[in-house]
Amino acid sequence: MLAEIITIGDEILIGQIIDSNSAFIGTQLNKAGVSVYQITSIQDDKQHILNALEEASRRVDIVIVTGGLGPTKDDITKETFCHFFKDKLVENKKVLQQVKYLFEKVYSRPISEVNKQQALVPSKAIVLKNEFGTAPGMWMNYQNKVFVSLPGVPYEMKALIKNQVIPRLIDKYELPSIQHTTLLTQGRGESAIAEHISDFETKLPNFVKLAYLPSTGRVRLRLSGKHNQESILSETMRNLSNTLKQLVSDIFVGYEEEGSFEQQIGKLLIEKQATLSVAESCTGGAISQRITKNAGVSAFYKGGVVSYATDVKENTLQVSKELISQHSVVSEEVASAMAMGVKKSLQSDYAIATTGNAGPAKGESEEEVGTICIAIATPSSVFTKKFYFGKNRERVINKAVNMSFELLKEEILKN
Amino acid sequence: MLAEIITIGDEILIGQIIDSNSAFIGTQLNKAGVSVYQITSIQDDKQHILNALEEASRRVDIVIVTGGLGPTKDDITKETFCHFFKDKLVENKKVLQQVKYLFEKVYSRPISEVNKQQALVPSKAIVLKNEFGTAPGMWMNYQNKVFVSLPGVPYEMKALIKNQVIPRLIDKYELPSIQHTTLLTQGRGESAIAEHISDFETKLPNFVKLAYLPSTGRVRLRLSGKHNQESILSETMRNLSNTLKQLVSDIFVGYEEEGSFEQQIGKLLIEKQATLSVAESCTGGAISQRITKNAGVSAFYKGGVVSYATDVKENTLQVSKELISQHSVVSEEVASAMAMGVKKSLQSDYAIATTGNAGPAKGESEEEVGTICIAIATPSSVFTKKFYFGKNRERVINKAVNMSFELLKEEILKN
């Protein structure tokens, strides 16, 4: 079964927002055994929507449309559906009830005529209840294909996909099993890895593909398999990923599917019943934000200090004035003192500290833009290292965050 | 002039990465006066690439392809181009030089045969030098259309778009002026705004469009104009945005084009020569991260404390044990004490504090998941407010961050 995702809305085309909805839908469809063949982002325009539906119906079996629904947009999109499916709009009582309920009980606002029109849906559509908003989802069977239309608001769309679209697809089709395993590597280039594992790649069975995904200092190796028998696929994927892991054992740092680096570190710390704190200068809260993005981190995470100003390093982290003037704020010595300071003050077992210059201008230190010092304090010692991450602020911060987690993981595994 | 962006690579289709490249390209093309008509993400497969090129060439004048280049992917993409353009691959001396230079001087790694093949390009292509990587950009004029192929690594692609593609497009075509103005509003729903400004919307000139963009608690109103004469467009857009601003004056909070909320706050603080610090519990560093994402913030930002554990609130922020046991950690009283604590300890003029329960499970407080207390300390007082932001962790954190900046801005403007 092949699917196409169509997103409607100029905001994606002019670059005002990044299309994260499609990534979510892609992941969910894949898990269920549906391959996404294409993603198409189009303008909020009747003829363009018609063309896109027509073309998609020639390419795939399942078409998922997001966006173009909502009190000020409904007209075009829903009428275009009616045109395409040779149908007409009728008022749906259940949707009207839900719209009334939301306005009366949740929003506490008077309901308008425009809102009531959200209850109009194509007569042949199966209505998918939107738990969190007024625009309903719609499921249409047409010429042996499935067309689904969902609102573009991310949390409304996500609930509809998970609770309604995926279960209905699984119910309707006999879907194959799709599995991905992604090995994270660190420290070697794409072409060098490709030459080293070329034999492995040539011998892959025809239902498994290998992809190289390079990004800021890492290459990820993704094995993707698709097979009608889940047991065969699982065993093949397990064997192949073990073989590949051995082939790249010197640069292997983990499996992406076992969670992000932060989540893997969280698990290790909880196992050890150890705690963590963070002192951030150049990363400015990004390490802390990455950790606390996940729920349940209070089991190991104490908190952190963002010491952006030098006097905060001195007063809150107890880094001595002399040390700073002797080595400058961007130095392994200061990173080390910051890590010790936050570890002591927040009473944790481990600590990360970063100090550096993310650019674009030089700060209080004479160090080059892109120079970052990272320190990892463990229950018994401190490890520090200096890096140069280039001149792009966003990249420097990202690389520093990634590297901090990698160094911390190494130190935890040593202890 | 219409453009289509084609991104090649399964990683987008299976949802492994979010397509941020297209948003960047869309923004840059728009600024230059090129409208993006469609974005198409496709599989790394010869026939699919051929189909996409063929279809795009029927829709638009300019086709920008990203991805599918790199030492392990070159084969398919470059050969497919040759097939489509009826061309053949030839070795380009300048590209070979650049590849050799990067391996010898920058990567300090031996160069392989696979890498040398990156110097093969279609004979009719104009090579666009990739400053940061081995895969060159390519520009092809074919049947009165322009086709550009770029590597998918974001910082390589970005430099190529800015320094080579956009200047060449401006050189080749007489492009119209395209302008967007986006008004940020807070506190009213999409349909209520639409009814209120329906007269304004009906009377818009035919070269200006209005779009409603709802997202977590805000509706953004975007005016988009396109005209051959920049002076006419600028004046029209200025007048329209002023009229619209007056129509929604009670809910207007700023223009998106003047920078993010954080940047607007930064400007205000620098004007006042005032400083800021942050104490975060439930937001876990996200406020600090959003501030320090921008360069130059050390002019007003002192730093912050992430007091995830209760004992960090007590020890580092000097919130008294009694206050916490009397009111619970999630209370306006504790938020207020945290703001005062961090303001005093980091010696700033203003401070933000957040405490709450982002979920999914209840923490040490009995408060409902989604309850957030925010405090803003000013040079002379503290303001606090309690919110309920629903049950989705990511949304709760985002809403708390947005609301913190809004409340802070209000307090700064009062003082």
Image (spheres, coloured by chain):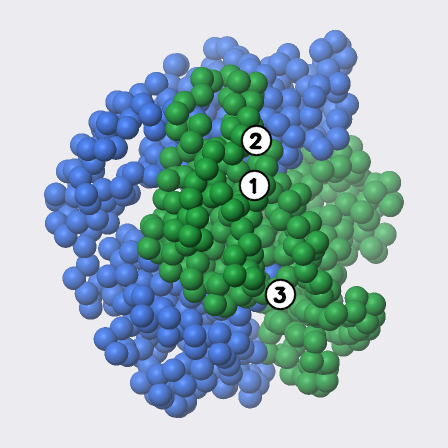
Chain colours: A blue, B green
Q: Dot 3: what SS?
A: loop
The CA distance from mark 3 to mark 2 is 31 Å
The CA distance from mark 1 to mark 3 is 23 Å
Q: Mark 3–mark 2 contact, CB under 8 Å? A: no
Residue named by callout 1: B127
Q: Dot 1: what SS?
A: strand
B409 displayed left or right of B190: right
Kind of residue indicated by mark 3: Met
Q: Kindly identify which chain the residue marked by label 3 belongs to.
A: B
Kind of residue indicated by mark 1: Val
The CA distance from mark 2 to mark 1 is 9 Å
Q: Is residue A21 visible?
A: no
A201 displayed left or right of B67: left
Other-residue count near label 1 (Cα within 10 Å), few / some / many at <14 / 14–19 / ≥20: some
Q: Mark 1–mark 3 contact, CB under 8 Å? A: no
Q: Position of residue A289 (x, y in %)?
A: 54, 39
Residue named by callout 2: B94
Residue sitting nearer the eye, A312 or A384:
A384
Q: Is residue A174 visible?
A: yes
**Image: A360 above or below A42:** above
Q: Mark 2–mark 1 contact, CB under 8 Å? A: yes
**Image: A168 above or below B361:** below
Residue named by callout 3: B1
- Say which residue appears at 71% left-offset and 33% top-offset: A360
Image quarter hosting the N terminus of chain B: bottom right
Q: Position of residue B62 (x, y in %)?
A: 56, 59
Other-residue count near label 2 (Cα within 10 Å), few / some / many at <14 / 14–19 / ≥20: few
Other-residue count near label 3 (Cα within 10 Å), few / some / many at <14 / 14–19 / ≥20: some
- Say which residue appears at 31% left-offset and 70% top-offset: A58
Marks 1 and 3 belong to one chain: yes
Kind of residue indicated by mark 2: Lys
